[in-house]
């Protein structure tokens, strides 16, 4: 005979997490629990999607206030059974009608809003506990800094929630912890300039979202390495010292240097 499963002790916590109502230590504890609990992972996805949709709700007055007209109409018909419950009940009924209309309107909204909420939740749940995002298998492992940079850029560009902000902070921390003394983000291999350009751009974008905070030394070192590895023709190749510049690699370095220049890093200008 199959024994019924006991309820998860964290039942109800995913909603509080999605609302940003948990203290940092409680949120971290729940993230550790959710990493091994399929039920909480699924509930977290649903709750985060719901919160994302609620935050997208337009903040504007309704086109027409139906409460007054409905009550006036009811008052003109004293024989109506509604009036046996008094004006308060009539007002409540009118509000329920408005809510029903509101949910009908909400459900007809652009489905892209739901997709954005689902994408946001995927970013949070796909992030590894150390703050990075990774590809599948050993072959993609050298590109973890670039993939983490792309995840960080997406998290910064999506509508901000507590969980996404925490994910972005963890990703930035991982990138800086895995940086070499000379500023290299990731290992030296034939595709390392992709890591450098994408991860540097993401770090700088993250820094620009914290105005007034000093620029981390790691971000400056990352920019300096891009400048120092520029080819004499003005481009960048697949590997450090590669004499043949590559367009896609160069574009990522260019975007990072443009962001650096807007943030006042003067060494970016000559390379640009």
Image (cartoon, grey):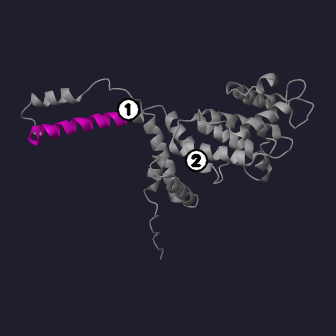
Compare marks 1 and 2 and give the one earlier in the sequence: 1
Q: Which residue is mark 2?
A: 124
Left or right of residue 186, residue 12 in this image: left
- Distance, label 1 to label 2, CA atoms, is 29 Å
Residue beneath the point at 55% across and 55% down: 28
Q: Quadrant of residue 77?
A: top left
Q: Is residue 252 above or below residue 30?
A: above
Instruction: Name the disc covering residue 121, or none.
Output: none
The prevailing secondary structure element of the residues shown in magenta is: helix
Residue that badge 1 annotates: 105
Disc 1: CA contacts within 10 A as few (<14), some (14-19) or many (>=20):
few
On the rendered structure, is 205 left or right of 75? right
- Residue 83 visible somewhere in the drawing: yes
Q: Position of residue 20 (x, y in %)?
A: 47, 47
Label 1 sits on a secondary structure element that is helix
Span shown in magenta: 82-104
Q: Nearer the viewer, mark 1 or mark 2?
A: 2
Q: Secondary structure at mark 2?
A: helix
> Magenta segment: does it hold 33?
no
250 or 257: which is nearer to us? 257
Residue drawn 71% across and 34% down?
201
Q: Residue at x 13, y 38 (%)?
A: 82
């Amino acid at each position: 005979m199959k024994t019924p499963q006991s309820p998860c002790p964290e039942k109800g916590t995913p909603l509080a997490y999605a609302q940003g109502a948990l203290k940092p230590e409680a949120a971290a504890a729940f993230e550790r629990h959710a990493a091994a609990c399929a039920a909480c992972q699924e509930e977290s996805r649903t709750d985060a999607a719901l919160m994302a949709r609620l935050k997208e709700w337009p903040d504007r007055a309704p086109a027409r206030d139906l409460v007054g007209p409905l009550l006036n109409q009811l008052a003109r018909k004293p024989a109506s059974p509604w009036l046996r419950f008094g004006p308060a009940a009539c007002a409540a009924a009118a509000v329920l009608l408005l809510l029903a209309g509101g949910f009908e309107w909400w459900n007809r909204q652009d489905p892209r809003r739901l997709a954005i909420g689902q994408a946001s939740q995927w970013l949070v749940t796909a992030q590894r506990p150390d703050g990075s995002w990774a590809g599948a298998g050993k072959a993609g492992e050298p590109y973890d800094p670039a993939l983490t940079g792309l995840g960080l850029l997406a998290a910064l560009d999506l509508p901000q929630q507590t969980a996404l902000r925490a994910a972005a902070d963890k990703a930035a921390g991982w990138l800086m912890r895995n940086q070499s003394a000379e500023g290299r983000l990731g290992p030296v291999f034939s595709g390392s300039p992709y890591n450098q350009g994408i991860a540097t751009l993401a770090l700088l974008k993250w820094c620009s979202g914290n105005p007034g905070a000093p620029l981390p030394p790691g971000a400056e070192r990352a920019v300096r390495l891009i400048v120092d590895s520029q080819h004499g023709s003005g481009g960048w190749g697949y590997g450090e010292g590669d004499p043949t510049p590559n367009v896609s690699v160069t574009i990522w370095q260019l975007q990072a240097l443009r962001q650096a220049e807007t943030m006042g890093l003067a060494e970016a200008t000559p390379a640009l």
